[in-house]
Image (tube, rainbow, N blue to C red):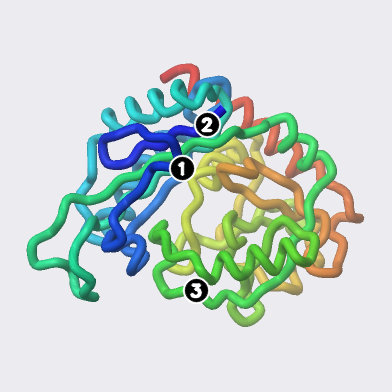
Amino acid sequence: MARTAYVNGRFAPIGAATVPVEDRGYQFADGVYEVLLVVDGMLWDAQGHFARWRRSLSELAIPLPMSEASMRLVVRKLLRRNRLRNALVYMQATRGVAPRNHAFPVRPPAPSIVMTARPFDLPSANRKAEKGVRVILAEDIRWGRVDIKTVSLLPNVLAKDAARRAGAIEAWLHRGRVVTEGASSNAWIVDPDGALVTHPKTNEILGGITRESVMACAEELQMKVIERPFTLEEASAAREAFITSATNLVTPVVTIGDRAVGGGAPGDVALRLRRAYIDRSARLAAAV
């Protein structure tokens, strides 16, 4: 079936959906994005994603292109038009269209907004989690405000492509010997004492919405969470490792670089958290 996109108030076949060449998102990466996970027609962690969407726009001084209620309505229509009940919905807003000039336009244009949807296969994702995944290591060369979810992702793209070429699914980024996060996920380890360790929310990482939900799951399961930087050496010596994101949920990591983690098999902690996250997300989404 042909895919349908939403662009600035109109639905169109994705091959015909366009924005002007002087859109500042295209010329300057002057915009932000979010990805919503939809399972059985329900939006998971939507409240957190919309909150981060508003924060990212505010940090770049881009006006809200539409209200949250209107965006939710567009998402529902987009899912129906694409006949999807399990999907990843991509939302992007830019400062809009203006003659090319680095400084913000004196007369602010209307923000541009684009939404697309593609299928999400939860059973396939579960099978991947049951086997565990490999991550490579890459220097973190991103700018100093990665806490804003901007469309400026070239360092992430380079790291992801290096991971793909190495037969891995993710790259763990590090500054010096300290792991910050994955190219498109948050990084976690289980230390020798059984505590969950992940980098604190600073300008050096994008505070993941799934990350926050997993912390809530850990609290319910009475697991200890420590927000602090961890090193490459600690990652190599960890009992377990895993990544979290809207697309990966909670996925065990069994190899970091060339080193096996936890005997090279998914750990009980990560798998237990994944089940808890799925149960919690489905329960909360159904209650909305």
Q: Which residue lies under the disc numbered 1?
A: 15
Q: Secondary structure at mark 1?
A: loop
Q: Which residue lies under the disc numbered 2?
A: 2
Residue 19 placed where, x, y %? 32, 51
* Image quadrant assignment for residue 103: bottom left
* Image quadrant assignment for residue 48: top left
Q: Are marks 2 and 1 in contact (CB under 8 Å)?
A: yes
Height in image: 28 above or below 185?
Answer: below
Q: Given the image, on which type of amino acid does mark 3 rest?
A: Arg
Using the numbered discs, state the Cα–Cα distance from disc 2 to disc 3 in whole angstroms.
36 Å
Residue at the limit of the structure toward the bottom, as seen here: 176
For disc 1, the neighbor class at 10 Å (few under 14, some 14 to 19, many from 20) is few
Height in image: 173 above or below 67?
Answer: below
Asked whether, in this view, residue 80 is left or right of residue 257, the answer is left
**Quarter that holds the C terminus:** top left
Using the numbered discs, state the Cα–Cα distance from disc 3 to disc 1 in whole angstroms.
31 Å
Is any part of residue 283 visible from this angle? no
Q: Earlier in the sequence, mark 2 or mark 3?
A: 2
Q: Given the image, on which type of amino acid does mark 2 rest?
A: Ala
Residue 5 placed where, x, y %? 41, 37
Q: Secondary structure at mark 2?
A: loop
Q: Secondary structure at mark 3?
A: loop
| Residue depth check, mark 2 versus mark 3: number of the one nearer the observer | 2
Q: Given the image, on which type of amino acid does mark 1 rest?
A: Gly
Residue 104 placed where, x, y %? 18, 68
